[in-house]
Image: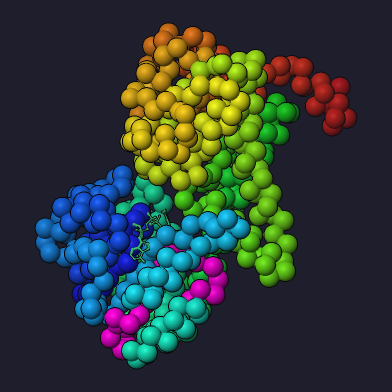
Amino acid sequence: MARIAVIGCGYVGAVSAACFAELGHEVDCIDYDVSRIALLKAGKSPIHEPGLESLIAHHVDKGRLHFSTEYPERFAAKIVFIAVNTPESQEGAADIRAVRDAVAMVAPRLAPGSIIVNKSTVPIGTGDLVAGMARRAGGGPISVVSNPEFLREGSAIDDFMAPDRIVLGSDDLEAISRVAELYEPLDAPILRVDIRTAEMVKYASNAFLATKISFINEIASICEALGADVEEVARGMGLDDRIGPKFLKAGLGWGGSCFPKDVKALAHMASLHGTHPQLLRSVMDINNGQRLRTVQKVRGALGGLEGKRVAILGASFKADTDDIRNSPAIDLANLLILEGATVAIFDPVVPGARIQSAAPGVEASGSAMAAASGSDALVLATDWPEFKELDLRDLRQAMRHDVLVDARNFYPATRARAAGFEYHCIGRPSEEGAPLRALRPMTLAAVGGA
Ligand code: NAD
């Protein structure tokens, strides 16, 4: 078992460190964030991620996980993972300043023959840049490996411990083998490629998944116009092995800390190098459109938004995480506020202060009932499983008006209607009570029928 280090203890770093400890390795973790490190040292998780806190507590206790805010004079570890943030820059490129900073701190502190492994999502060519920095640090030969991370927030531990694949990119095959050994207990295929290809696999995978969601959202809009049910369409498509059922859920669109910045960064890189990423641009366009279409549904149902109170269920970008970076729910709140609505949000795990800093002027409610009370419309924005348990009848009774916009097709229409709601959803006109009969003759006429 090896001694390794992880730089950055966020969603990827903390999970990777805890999971590497679970695989039997000893892990030194460094992050500048003092409060994050204080929590981790105490065996607590700084983020909401199922299963993470108990794993951290266990391995801190066993002495396999160490945390610090300071870089050591010399690393004891000979393999150092970089898992720092690479946010979106104003121009749409990935901002790799944190990666540069981390490498500048790591490289001079490594013994010759060490390996820097990059887990952050970085523009194609960053590996070469890191190799150049390591060379210039002058402490002897240091190898660079790209090992992009594919974990999903909300199921990060399972994703790390049972990955579909592990991608390792480098021109140093021995370095690849040494990193591969760390993952040996996992029964996963390992793709060994060059460093740029590894970096590209990450962007291409995220862009493809975002495309799948935008595709079904576009189909949902067409379903609404033509009187088909997108949920059944997605089921019918997903049963085809070549397509598969995942990421075919129509709704409010994708968000979070990865898809938005990664699709944008890939399009940016493509444009910078003279190619025209038309598909990626459409994928982003459709995604933004889903937020706007949802605002339109609320506005349409209420006959205007000025002076109306809208309750939003969910703030995180998806269930089982407290991450609100690029959250569709937050975007929706800001759009509604711009149109003069008062907005109350309830989320089961995201602290109210964070919701308010992302959506200034919003009321952060302590419960679904508090948000719904006196509201004109209720919008289901994040599919937290506990929202299934809500008593819709009670919520309806506490409201001033009866509109429910289900932006994730989460509730059965019959249940929502039985609770007294005027129910609206995405891409299911029959569920919404749209005039299907009026659509039918038009559709038939369009295909040359009656
Ligand atoms: P994060 O913002 O949650 O965590 C990054 C951490 O790095 C922060 O705690 C920050 O303080 C620390 N940091 C920054 N610079 C540092 C430095 N020089 N030295 C020490 N610590 C430093 O980010 P994240 O969500 O974990 O993402 C990390 C990378 O992994 C990004 O490139 C992201 O695109 C990629 N990624 C994220 C996910 C995800 O689900 N969040 C999944 C796959 C890949």
Question: Does residue 206 appear anywhere in the picture?
Answer: no
- In this picture, residue 410 sits left or right of residue 301: left
Q: Residue at x 59, y 29 (%)?
A: 338
User: Which quarter shows the C terminus?
Assistant: top right
Say above or below: 404 vs 86: above
Question: Does residue 328 appear anywhere in the picture?
Answer: yes
Say above or below: 209 vs 398: below
The picture quadrant for ligand 1 comes to bottom left
Please state the extent of the stretch shown in magenta in the rendering: 107-127
Between 312 and 219, the one nearer to me in the picture: 312
Quarter of the image where one finds residue 150:
bottom left
- In this picture, residue 355 sits left or right of residue 306: left
Quarter of the image where one finds residue 107:
bottom left
- The image position of residue 198, as x and y in percent, is 50, 71
Q: Residue at x 61, y 36 (%)?
A: 290
Q: Residue at x 29, y 82 (%)?
A: 110
- The image position of residue 352, as x and y in percent, is 36, 33
Say above or below: 291 vs 42: above
Say above or below: 119 vs 349: below
- The image position of residue 30, as x and y in percent, is 27, 65
Between 27 and 30, the one nearer to me in the picture: 30
